[in-house]
Image (cartoon, grey):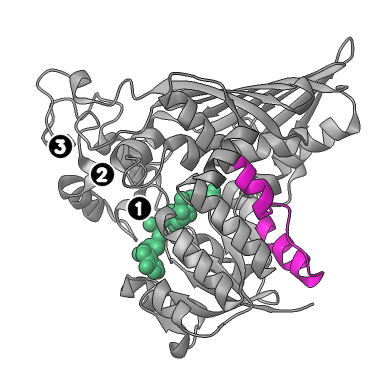
Amino acid sequence: MKQYTVAIVGLGGRGLDCYAAYQKKFPERMKITAIADIDEKRVKYTREKYSVPESGCFDSAESLLEREKLADVLIIATQDRQHRAHALKALERGYDILLEKPVAVTASDCIEIRDAAHRAGRAVTICHVLQYTTFYRTIRDIINSGVIGEPVTVNALENVGYWHQAHSFVRGNWRNDQIESPMILQKCCHDFNILCWLLNKQCVSVSSVGSLKYFKESNAPKGSAARCVDCKYAQTCPYSALRIYIDNKDVGYRQGNRDWPCNVLVKEPTEESLMEAIKTGPYGRCVYRCDNNVVDHQVVNMRMQDDVTVSFTMTGFTAYNYRELKVMGTLGEIVADQRLNTVTVTPFGGESTVYDINKIADDLSGHGGGDNRMLTEMFDALDKGGVAASSIDDAIAAHLIAFAAEESRLRGGENINMAEFEKTINAG
Ligand SMILES: NC(=O)c1ccc[n+]([C@@H]2O[C@H](COP(=O)([O-])OP(=O)(O)OC[C@H]3O[C@@H](n4cnc5c(N)ncnc54)[C@H](O)[C@@H]3O)[C@@H](O)[C@H]2O)c1
C-alpha cells in the first residue's frame, strides 16, 4: 500500500483541522511534505504538529506553487475565490488535486477548471463529502435495490439552522456574494451533487425563488444596539452572539464546545478571548446591521431526466442544522432524517424498515464520516490510477445547477434549461 505525499494550501478549518488530521489516523497512507498559509502561526503550528520539514513550509499558496511539484497530491483548502488560481497553477505543476468546494465562484471559472483538469489528465477530486457518508450511501443502496420502484419525485430540505445562518451567512465569511459567492452555491452545491448522484440523473431545467427577507436593518428591534455586548436584547434575542458562542446548548463555550463555530472567532478559544472577539470582531455585530446580502431562504425546483422532479428548500429559519429528504417512488418511499440519523423505507402496503445510521456506521466523525472516507477512497482510487466518487465532472454539473438557480431567482423564478445555460456560459 503506497504512502502518498501531500501538500496542503490553506490551513484553516478544512486544511488543518480536517485534512491534516488524517495523517494522525492513517500515517501509513498520507505524509504531509509541504504546507502553506498566509498566517505564519498556522504554518508553525502545523509544522510542529505534523513534523513537516522546514523546507516544505511556505507563506502562501502562491509561493508553494512557484516551486516544482512537492508532493503527489495537493489539497486546496483556501477560500472560495482563490480556488481558481490555485487549481489552475497546480494542474500546470502536475499535481493530482483534492479541491474544496465550491470549485470556483463563477460558472465560467468552474468550467475553465474542469476543462483544464481534462487537458492535464490529472485526478481531481472535489470535496463533496456527503457522497462518502453512510447516511447517503444507505439511501442510494435502497434506491438501487428497487424496493421503492422507480423514484418519481424528491422533497429535500436543507435546514441551515438559525445560529449557523447568523454565524456564516449574516456575520461571517459567506454573508455577501460580492465578497464570496451566492449562498445557494456555497451551501447547496453539495445538495445538488447528492441529489443527482442519488437519482443517477442529470438536471434538465431549474427554477428558483427566494430572498433576504429578515436579516436587515428594517427588522432590528426598537432600541437594539450595533453590537450584542451593548444591546438590551442580548439575553433574549436568539441571534445574540453571546447566546450563540457562550451559552448555546449545542455549540456554546459553556457547554464545552472548543471547536466550530467558536474556533472561527479565536483559534483556541477561552471564555475571555471569545468575549473579546464578540466585543470587537465581526461575529459580535447585530444580525440586523451587517453588510450581508445573501438570501436567508430559497426554493429550487428541478426537472431531472426521465420526468423525475425535485423540490429543494434551503432555509436559515430552523432550530437545528441538518438535512432531510423524502424520495417518493412508484412502489414505496424513503424518509431520511440526518438529525435522527435514520433512513426509513416503506414499500407501499408493506412494513417500514428503519436503518439507524448510528448503529451501522463505523465512523461518524467530520461530516458523518465523509471527510475521512473521502481521503481514504481518493488514495484507493489513485492506487488504481483513477478518481474517487466525487469527480470534477459531476461536481461541476452540480455547481452549474446552483448558478442556474441563482440566475433564475434573480430573474424572478424564470425556468432555466441547463443545456442552454451551459452553452451561454461557454459562449460568454
Ligand atoms: N467540503 C465541505 O463541506 C466544506 C466545509 C466548510 C468549508 N468548505 C470550503 O473549504 C474552504 C476553506 O474553508 P475553511 O472553513 O477551512 O476556511 P478558513 O478561513 O478556516 O481557512 C482558509 C485558510 O486559507 C488561508 N489562506 C488565505 N489566503 C491564502 C493564500 N494565499 N495562501 C495560503 N493560504 C491562504 C487562511 O489564512 C486560512 O487559514 C472554503 O472554500 C470553504 O468554502 C468546505
- Picture quadrant of residue 269: bottom left
- Total number of numbered discs in the rendering: 3
Task: Kindly state the secondary structure of the residue where label 2 is placed.
Answer: helix
Q: Is residue 49 rendered to the left or right of residue 415?
A: left
- Report if residue 102 is visible in the image: no
Whether the magenta-drawn stretch holds residue 351 is answered as no
* Residue 227, percent from left and from top: 15, 37
Disc 2: CA contacts within 10 A as few (<14), some (14-19) or many (>=20): many
Q: Residue at x 61, y 33 (%)?
A: 420
Position of the N terminus by quadrant: bottom right
Above or below, comparing residue 243 to residue 44 in the picture: above
Alpha-carbon distance for marks 2 and 1?
9 Å
Magenta span: chief secondary structure: helix
Are circles 2 and 1 on residues that touch, CB within 8 Å?
yes
Secondary structure of the residue carrying tag 1 is helix
Of mark 3 and mark 2, the one earlier in the sequence is 3
x, y percent for residue 61: 42, 72
Pointer 2: what residue? 283
Over which residues does the magenta segment extend?
A: 372-398
Q: Amino acid at mark 2?
A: Tyr
Choose between 101 and 132: the one closer to the eye: 101
Residue that badge 1 annotates? 264
Callout 3: 10 Å neighbours few (<14), some, many (20+)?
many
Q: Three-letter amino acid code at disc 3?
A: Arg
Q: Reading the chain from its start, which is encountered first: label 1 or label 3?
A: 3
Please state which of residues 247 and 73 is positioned toward the viewer in this rendering: 73
Residue 227, numbered circle? 3
